[in-house]
Image (cartoon, grey):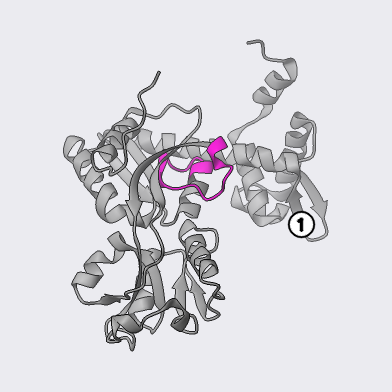
């Protein structure tokens, strides 16, 4: 494939420092703050931005009274910049691990619902095979891990789609299903109520800790309310951290809807009590999310093989 002169010129001029500046500008919206972020003087940062936009042949940021805002083409460029910088960081970290005598690094994004069962068992198996492989687990909810995957900050993710068009960006293989449960703290006024007396309508006026609207679990909850023609609770704490949610529930009268795998040990220990209300159905199965048209490193391929050992979903179809 022949590369055009304009593309070659762009490749020759673009540097990782330029990409760092673009990301810093997007995060701060301010040239002075962005220059400080990447440790250059503001005049140098201004010249760098001018050179970058000249190389691309279009504006990447609109100059507004309240700061810099990416143009539509700038947003596309920023997405690439974040992926490239994340890829470089993961490469450098893996190289450092190997230089110190290790066997590389594997970074995985994972929802907390997968952690107690599928993820934990697969990681244990992997570390038996490769004790010197540095394994890093990031994220807690699907919206968080999809963003990590989009930015190239993880090798692959264990979660579910958060938008109907994401199948265009990622491949998906179901690994397991997930049951959601309503829980309260031990000693909660609801804990001793007759199970026959429970209904969702009685709970709406109570405080809740819920995942953000961007999460599949929260959408499931709102859909269930819609089916029952109930309004959403008004007394809500939105929390994307499963650990923080557990702490909030154990120290207040709030209700939470959490994966069965996450609350199982808390229920056994008597720290939480499950409310006898059917959420409606299982949350759509979670699985392996990978970026399309990207070849995974061998440790990631092996880890996915181990995840499949604990899958309760049908195996993926064989390649033609």
Judging from the image, what secondary structure is the residue with disc 1 in? strand
Write down the quadrant of residue 49 in the picture: top right
The residue closer to the viewer here, 185 or 279, is: 279
Residue 172, relative to residue 38: is it above or below?
above
Write down the quadrant of residue 166 in the picture: top right
Residue 236, relative to residue 123: is it above or below?
below
- Which residue in the rendered view is the most extreme toward the top? 2
Q: Residue at x 44, y 56 (%)?
A: 141
Q: Residue at x 22, y 66 (%)?
A: 265
Q: Quadrant of the C terminus?
A: top left
Q: Position of residue 240 (x, y in %)?
A: 46, 64
Write down the quadrant of residue 80 in the picture: top right
> Few, some or many C-alpha atoms within 10 Å of disc 1 (few <14, some 14-19, many ≥20)?
some
Q: Quadrant of the N terminus?
A: top right
Horizontal relation, residue 308 to residue 161: left or right: left
Residue 60, relative to residue 4: is it above or below?
below
Q: Is residue 24 rendered magenta in the image?
A: no
The tally of labels here is 1
Residue 203, relative to residue 12: is it above or below?
below
Q: Position of residue 121 (x, y in %)?
A: 22, 47
| Residue that badge 1 annotates | 67
Q: Position of residue 189 (x, y in %)?
A: 33, 89
Residue interval drawn in magenta: 149-168
Q: Residue at x 68, y 19 (%)?
A: 8
């Amino acid at each position: 494939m022949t590369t055009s002169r304009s593309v070659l010129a762009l490749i020759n001029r673009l540097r990782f420092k330029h990409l760092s500046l673009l990301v810093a500008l997007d995060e701060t919206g301010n040239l002075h703050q962005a220059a400080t972020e990447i440790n250059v003087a503001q005049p140098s940062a201004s010249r760098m931005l001018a050179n970058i936009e000249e190389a691309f042949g279009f504006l990447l940021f609109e100059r507004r009274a309240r700061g810099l805002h990416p143009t539509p083409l700038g947003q596309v460029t920023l997405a690439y910049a974040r992926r490239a910088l994340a890829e470089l960081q993961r490469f450098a970290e893996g190289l450092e691990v190997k230089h110190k005598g290790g066997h590389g690094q594997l970074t995985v994004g994972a929802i907390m619902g997968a952690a107690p069962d599928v993820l934990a068992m697969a990681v244990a198996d992997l570390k038996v095979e490769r004790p010197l492989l540095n394994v890093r687990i990031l994220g807690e909810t699907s919206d968080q891990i999809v963003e990590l995957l989009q930015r190239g900050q993880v090798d692959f993710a264990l979660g579910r789609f958060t938008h109907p068009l994401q199948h265009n960006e990622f491949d998906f293989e179901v690994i397991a299903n997930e049951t959601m449960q309503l829980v309260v703290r031990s000693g909660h006024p609801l804990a001793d109520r007759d199970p026959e007396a429970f209904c969702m309508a009685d709970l709406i006026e109570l405080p809740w800790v819920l995942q953000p609207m961007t999460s599949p679990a929260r959408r499931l909850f709102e859909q269930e309310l819609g089916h029952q023609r109930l309004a959403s609770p008004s007394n809500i704490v939105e929390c994307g951290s499963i650990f923080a949610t557990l702490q909030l529930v154990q120290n207040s009268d709030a209700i939470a809807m959490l994966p069965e795998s996450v609350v199982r040990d808390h229920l056994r220990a008597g720290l939480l009590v499950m409310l006898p209300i059917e959420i409606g159905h299982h949350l759509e199965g979670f699985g392996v999310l990978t970026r399309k048209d990207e070849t995974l490193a061998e440790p990631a391929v092996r880890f996915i093989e181990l995840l499949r050992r604990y899958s309760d979903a049908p195996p993926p179809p064989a390649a033609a």
